[in-house]
Image (spheres, rainbow, N blue to C red):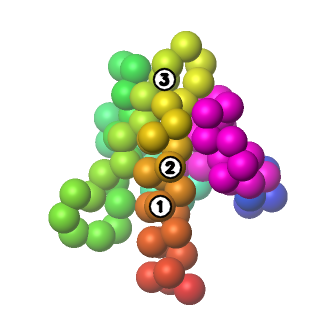
Amino acid sequence: MKGVAKIIQVMKENPKGVRFNDLQKVCIYYFGQPRQSGSSHCIYKTPWPGNPRVNIQNHKGKAKPYQVKQVLLAIEKIEIQHG
């Protein structure tokens, strides 16, 4: 968790500068293995009904800032539900 916590701190401070591989590590930690990967997109299932997925995209080694923000919101929702 220590490495993941550090990545999350970086995500909060600068969503534009997040490496895709780091975002992927965070998503695997919170959501498990992606249900789809292998292309430029990775799709992770979330534990709530509705739109139960987190979609991240590799853009030249970086994560898209709006997707970083979506992941942070999903993590916050998980922590509220389990906190």
**10 Å neighbourhood of mark 3: few (<14), some, or many (≥20)?**
some
Q: Disc 3 vs disc 1: which is toward the camera?
A: 1
Q: Position of residue 48 (x, y in %)?
A: 29, 70
Locate residue 81: give its quadrant. bottom left
Q: Residue at x 72, y 49 (%)?
A: 13
Q: Main secondary structure of the magenta part?
A: helix
Tell me which segment is drawn in magenta: 6-28
Which amino acid, by three-letter code, is at mark 1? Answer: Leu
What residue lies at 52% left-to-right and 69% top-to-bottom?
76
Looking at the image, can residue 65 be seen?
yes
The residue closer to the viewer here, 7 or 10, is: 10
Secondary structure beneath label 1: helix
Query: Is there CB contact under 8 Å for labels 3 and 1?
Result: no
Q: Percent position (x, y) of residue 44?
A: 38, 47
User: Is residue 8 magenta-colored?
Assistant: yes
Say how many tags the image has: 3
Mark 2 residue crowding within 10 angstroms, few (<14) / some (14–19) / many (20+): some
Q: Which mark is residue 13?
A: none
Q: Which residue lies under the disc numbered 3?
A: 58
Q: Report whether 80 appears left or right of 62.
A: left
* Residue that label 2 marks: 69
Distance CA(mark 3)–CA(mark 1) = 19 Å
- Disc 1 + disc 2, Cβ < 8 Å: yes
Q: CA distance from mark 1 to mark 2?
A: 6 Å
Indicate the secondary structure of the residue bearing disc 3. strand
Q: Give residue 53's position: percent from left, percent from top.
A: 31, 52
Q: Can you name the residue that lies furthest to the left here?
A: 50
Q: Residue at x 60, y 49 (%)?
A: 26
